[in-house]
Amino acid sequence: MLRLWSLLVLLALGFAQEVTVLTHSSFSLDKGLIARFERETGLKLRFLKGGDAGETLNRAILTKGAPIADVIYGLDNTFLSRALEADILLPYRSPEIRNLKATLLLDPTLRALPVDYGWVSLNYHRAYFKDRPLPKVPDDLARPEYARLLVVQNPATSSPGLAFLMTTVARFGEDGYLDFWARLRDGGVRVAKGWSEAYYTHFTLYKGDRPLVVSYTTSPAAEVYYSEGKYQEPPTGNLFPELAFFQVEFVGILKGTKNLEGARKVVDWFLSKPVQENIPTEMWMYPARREARLPEVFRFAPEPLGSVRLDPKAMAQNRERWIEEWTKVVLQGQSPEAVRRSRR
């Protein structure tokens, strides 16, 4: 009763405590859910969009000690080790953990808790390829007739871009992935800063000139959902689902938060059933909670039978080198052999 009375007093005085959530630029949740959380807790939520996942994490690391937010959402398994090594997160054993899929609990220290998961995948524009052949095998992407049709994201600033880079490492190996990227570069591949630029500026579905784009396996379902009846079938499709890269997104409490109790409530809220069932049609990822229901439109987003899953330790040990080598070859035009020699 005392707690309720305190809450009513705070609300009456207009002193709702604010909790700031640092997110990637693709963050979206139903406004009604947010309003309900604020009404029930007396907390005021402020969402601060920090760019793509990599940029968002970099902002959190650069402001360590004087955090610009209380909670961070959207760092993924490709960047998880960077966040943990930077020691920017507080551990939190949320009571909602028991409801999550155990396979997604990748951080045993419980500083980063899984919110959702999905697959980064190549998408193609069906109308463009109606009378043209699609590449038959992944290696075909590097042929000039396909490389100039492809837009990817910079892995230094984009989580799907980094996921696709890691996919090529997994497929072509340490000795071959740079050669593949050099062929893509020479063939005319385009590099965008992040997913939004690649998809909404360069993809032919949105009047760009690239009918192949690195996106997600759920993107075709999203196109049907947002078309409001225009599409009965997706206008896009997944290409080479065996190359889809498994991605998990996390939430965590930033060290130095001035509202620890409020931050914990926000983490619990992210993992609650109402938010988890809102995630598929807002952020187009699969919910981490076991019993969360999927919307009907997800029949256009089947989970791929095979996918790329790199060992977290390997990603942690090699991520920065892979990004550096990719930059030298793709953006600076160096030869793969010269870059390989520089490892020694």
Image (tube, grey):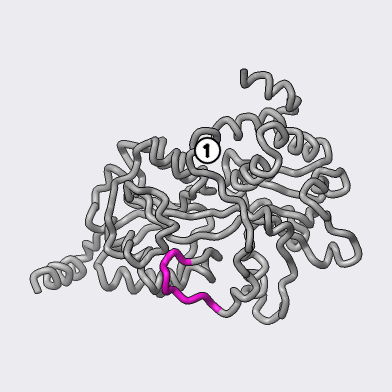
Place of residue 124 in the rendered image (x, y in percent of width and height, measured from the top left):
76, 60
Say left or right for 269 vs 125: left
Name of the residue lying farthest toward the left: 2
Please tell me whether residue 145 is drawn above or below residue 270 in the rendered image: above
Q: Residue at x 45, y 38 (%)?
A: 82
Please tell me which residue lies in front, 203 or 146.
Answer: 146
Please tell me which residue lies in front, 94 or 284.
Answer: 94
Please tell me whether residue 244 is drawn above or below residue 327 in the rendered image: below
Would you call the spot at circle 1 few (<14 residues within 10 Å), some (14-19), or many (20 or more)? few
Q: Amino acid at mark 1?
A: Ala
Q: What residue range appears in magenta?
A: 287-295
Say left or right for 30 vs 190: left
- In the rendered image, which quarter is residue 11 located in? bottom left
Q: Residue at x 65, y 79 (%)?
A: 228
Q: Residue at x 39, y 40 (%)?
A: 84
Q: Secondary structure at mark 1?
A: helix
Does the magenta segment cover residue 294? yes
Place of residue 170 in the rendered image (x, y in percent of width and height, measured from the top left):
64, 43
Say which quadrant the N terminus sits in. Answer: bottom left
Q: Main secondary structure of the magenta part?
A: loop
Place of residue 319 in the rendered image (x, y in percent of width and height, measured from the top left):
55, 36
Label count reads 1
Does the magenta segment cover residue 46? no
Please tell me which residue lies in front, 162 or 139.
Answer: 139
Q: Residue at x 42, y 74 (%)?
A: 291
Say which quadrant the C terminus sits in. Answer: top right
Name of the residue lying farthest toward the right: 131
Q: Which residue is mark 1?
A: 314
- In the rendered image, which quarter is residue 105 located in? bottom left
